[in-house]
Image: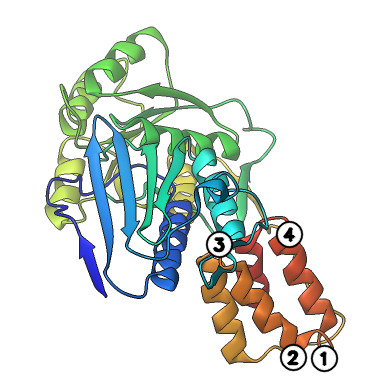
Amino acid sequence: LDFIVNDYSKLPLFIEADEQRLRQVLFNLLGNALKFTHQGAIELRCNYQKSQLVFEVIDTGIGIKKRDLKLIFKAFEQIKSSSDFRQGTGLGLTISQKLVTLMGGKMSVESELGEGTHFRLQLYAAAAKNGTNILINSENENYVLCDEFNGKLKILIVDDIRENRSLLVQIVETFGFITLEADNGESALALLQEQSVDLILMDIQMPKMNGYEATRKIKADAALRATPVVLVSAHVFEDERAKALECGAENFIEKPVKEDLLVKELETLLEVKFISQKPTVEIETTDKESVISQEDREKIIAAANALDANTIEEILNNYRKSDPQSVKIILDHINSFQFTKIIDFLS
């Protein structure tokens, strides 16, 4: 059995997409191809044009009857083909199609009995400048401004990548700040001529006018120079920090932005106080410790990542009498397509 991957050298290095969902869908399609292809080849194609990402999984396996193609994306359908029984395929494909739809894409299938199957997945995915996340959330605490500051201070967020701005806007507004946005240094300066802000968070690498130049102009303006500027960059070289301070910025923080460090910076520069809140997390438990072995836990987690309900159910059959509570919880998650919750429950 050969596995073929097309030339991917012309693909963008990074895209803006839901990594977890896309991985689960591809695992499911490739897993099905491996399960039902006994000889020949499995081919994975990937093409990208005009922000459209297309994956194709093509196999020379047992194929699907024409009349069964209409059922292939329906929940819990089990399709018999030749002497093989395509167990678990229907549920996994139902979930895959739902995930693709949630990502704004579409999935289709063509097949010939005895010849093989061709799945095609298409979705919009803009090319990204880099693969660096803009923000790391604090796992242990949530922060919010004290009442005397909440909703009263403005922060200007400057970044040419809309998604980066949106993420910072979301977290800063959650803190209790009012936010304004600009997509480069020039537009930031124009906005500052019209209204004042209390602090500026500005990316360094931007078109038209980068963060260094914009900061110099802000600090050269008598009406603006008192406004604190914090430059943000994925580059962590010491000279970047030195350049930031040389051009007049109050400080430099690196991407991905750590929430607790951002809070400390805002407290220092704006002389504000935050309230730290511990998030409440609902954890599913059973009345007694689960007896599912570590080996089977790992198998179930691997199957959940591949949306393979059938394998999970086969393993659970061994625990229906000894651990009915855990079995019920996991089966309920399968029935509601919540495979991530299965992973959380067993981890």
Residue at numbered disc 1: 322
- The numbered mark, 2 or 1, whose residue comes first in the sequence reads 2
- Depth check, front residue: 296 or 227: 296
Residue at numbered disc 2: 291
Residue at numbered disc 3: 89
Q: Is residue 154 visible in the rendered structure shown here?
A: yes
- The numbered mark, 3 or 4, whose residue comes first in the sequence reads 3
Give the position of the N terminus as an image quadrant: bottom left
- The numbered mark, 2 or 4, whose residue comes first in the sequence reads 2
Label 2–label 1 contact, CB within 8 A:
yes
Residue at numbered disc 4: 335
Label at residue 144: none
Query: At label 4, which amino acid type do we have?
Result: Asn
Q: Residues within 10 Å of mark 3 (few under 14, many from 20)?
A: many
Q: Position of residue 198 (x, y in %)?
A: 45, 27
Q: Is residue 129 visible in the rendered structure shown here?
A: no
Residue 246 vertical position relative to residue 210 in the rendered view, above or below? below
